[in-house]
Image (cartoon, rainbow, N blue to C red):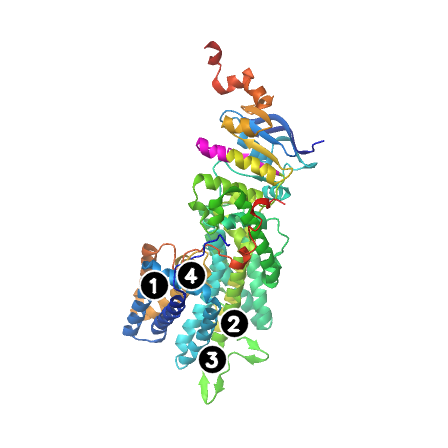
Amino acid sequence: MVEKILTVKNLTMRFGGLTAIDNFSWDLHENEILGIIGPNGAGKTTVFNVISGLYTPTSGDIRFKGTTINGYPPHKIAKMGIKRTFQQSRLFDNISVLDNVLIGMATISENIFINTLFRRDLLQKELASNINEAMQLMQHFSQVLVENPYRRAGDLVPGERRKLEICRALASNPDILLLDEPAAGMDPNESSELMDDIMRVKSLRKGIGIVLIEHDMVVVQKTADYIVVLSYGKEIARGTFNEVSSNSTVQEAYLGSELENA
Amino acid sequence: MNPIKMNDSTTNRTLNRIITPILLIVVVASVYLVVVYENVITTIAGLLLGVGVFFGYSRYPKLKESVNDGIKKDKVYLIITGLILAFIIPLTTRTQPYIIHILIIAEISIILALGLNFQVGSTGIPNLGYAAFYGVGAYASALLSTKFGMSFWVSLLAAGFIAAFFGWLVGLPTLRTRSYHMALVSIAFGLVTYIMLNNLVFTGGPNGIKNIPAPEIFGWSLFSTIRLFGNSFPVQINFYYFVLLFLVLMLAIAFFVYNSKIGLFWNAVREDEIAAKCSGINTAKLKLLSFAMGAFLAGIAGSLYAHYIGYISPENFNFNTSLQVLGMVIMGGLDNIVGVSIGAFILSVAPEKFRSLADFRMLATGLIILLMLMFRSSGIIRQQIREYKKSHFRTELANKDEGNG
């Protein structure tokens, strides 16, 4: 039996009078890629912000491996093993490519502060192994990153930025990866490369669960195992890609109801 | 073999190893000319020499590459040379206590600037009230040793920790405020501290604290004159070496922290706080740490200052001082320890050297900052990309295709 790693139950998020997410429930299993789709403003990114702890949900329950995590601070949730990327990729621009990945790794390091001053040998040993691991990780995704570990992250082209962001998230070996519109602004070539990357993540980290928010339907179709459709904060359909894409409510939400008259 | 391209393949190594020391000698000579001689011609000559080297360095990429390469390769020798120079220079000026006094103030300024760099440079938190920590350290140390009869060493440590506590306290509002608002909060803290020092009875009000005892090392006061081989050295020289010891210690701490996980996390907080949080960094804790550590250095600097001068008053720790230290950090180069030290040295020595200009001396200092920001806004030495030892990469990618175990 495949284990559930994330359970979202009756999640509701209100901002003042606006209900951004309304009674939203789903599960994420090991080794699964879950796609969340929906028109602009449907509340998809809000779901991620709630799960990663940036917002505290108005009501509902988020359970990660049996522990309720709503209300936890973002860094704690990230440390527990839920990592995310952002719609507008947020890298640490003025430091190097390698350092970006090393930061991801260092967050789970056991070395305490006092070692900084007194146990340089331990620190150097850890650093060496982290650097190796980081280079290997980047090797799986992009030759450009491996060849330029000392390039400023801010000088990378958008495609590479996205890859680096995924590397940074994967560096700490998370159980869940939340990808927020990774294909935004990509041409067909780049997005097909991205699909390969997503499948690679799945094969690299055994058992990882991925939640994917995406507008590019090709990407969703090729990668997601299961899809939930969100419109104005409410779930309107769920199922495999073929099931949802033939659903009339979904077509209406995306294309407007005039379609029926045409 | 190693896919990492280091830039040593193209340039001539022997040449690099010669050029760097030569340039460093020229730089040290120019500094020496400016600092040591009370003479307009030597000052100008020294300045021209220094600026010339600097322009040559930044204008010719080849030269720059050679020097950088040389610095990287011979780091240990350069540090030793630097220490020897720092040791010898005051001996050559032992007949001019005033020069040594300037150098001591420069040393204390460098410690101060290193502390502020933790916040402004590494973590990216504006702090315009830094002099308050300096003041808290100086007053804590002075009060403990004059009113409670504590020894210098106890007072010094206490000053560091009391200042660190204040740093932590001021850090708390930064968890909720950002950029301009944070700058305002820090200014307010600086002003409040200044006014408190000025009005409280036990701090001596505007008169400050007098007769702060000199530090003693195993019962030997730093205010006693050393006689060696028939030469007598001014007391300032004792302090020079004493403060130098602390400076080297603080520089070592700053480098260690910069190269550690903490330095890296601070940078992450500076670059993007939300991304840092979602990467698993406790940003609140790290910001507080940056405040506490910066304030600790300021507290140590304050204590050293108090025990060296022997007299402190609130005027030493006003808003101007905060701005001066901030100027040192920004002019030197944010988040670059060597740069910040150079900036602090220049901005603490310059006003003294311009004394002959009387009322215009602050104008001259302002002019230096203005020119600096116009022609090199990222500071004397800009923020660098961390580079790791080549040996750390060695075993990497041996198992390219099955690295997922």
Q: Mark 4 points at which residue?
A: B339
Identify the element where label 2 is drawn. helix
Q: Position of residue B128 (x, y in %)?
A: 45, 54
Query: Circle 2 sits on which residue?
Result: B245
Q: In this view, does A1 lie above or below B325?
A: above
Task: Give the residue type that dot 1 points to.
Answer: Phe
Residues at circles 3 and 4 in contact by the CB criterion of under 8 Å:
no
Q: Mark 1 highlights which residue?
A: B54
Q: Report in which chain the residue with disc 2 lies.
A: B
For label 3, the residue is B235
Q: Disc 1 or 2, which lies upstream in sequence?
A: 1
Q: What SS does tag 4 mark?
A: helix
For the residues tagged 2 and 3, is the chain the same?
yes
Q: Measuring from the top left, give residue A35's x and y in whole percent.
A: 57, 29
Q: Nearer the viewer, residue B193 or B331?
A: B331
Q: Tell me where residue A1 sits by quadrant.
A: top right
Q: Mark 1 lies on which chain?
A: B
Distance from the alpha carbon under mark 3 to that under mark 1: 35 Å
The answer to which of marks 2 and 3 sits earlier in the sequence is 3
**Mark 4 on the same chain as mark 2:** yes
Q: Give the CA separation, mark 3 to mark 4.
A: 30 Å
Say if labels 3 and 4 share a chain.
Answer: yes
Crowding around mark 4 (Cα neighbors within 10 Å: few <14, some 14 to 19, many 20+) is: many
Is mark 1 in CB contact (under 8 Å) with mark 2? no
C-alpha distance separating marks 4 and 2: 20 Å
B372 left or right of B179 in image: left
Say which of B64 and B305 sits in front.
B64
User: Which residue is painted at 54% across and 20% down in the image?
Assistant: A245
Mark 3 belongs to chain: B
x, y percentage for residue A196? 53, 35
Residues rendered magenta in the picture = A176-193
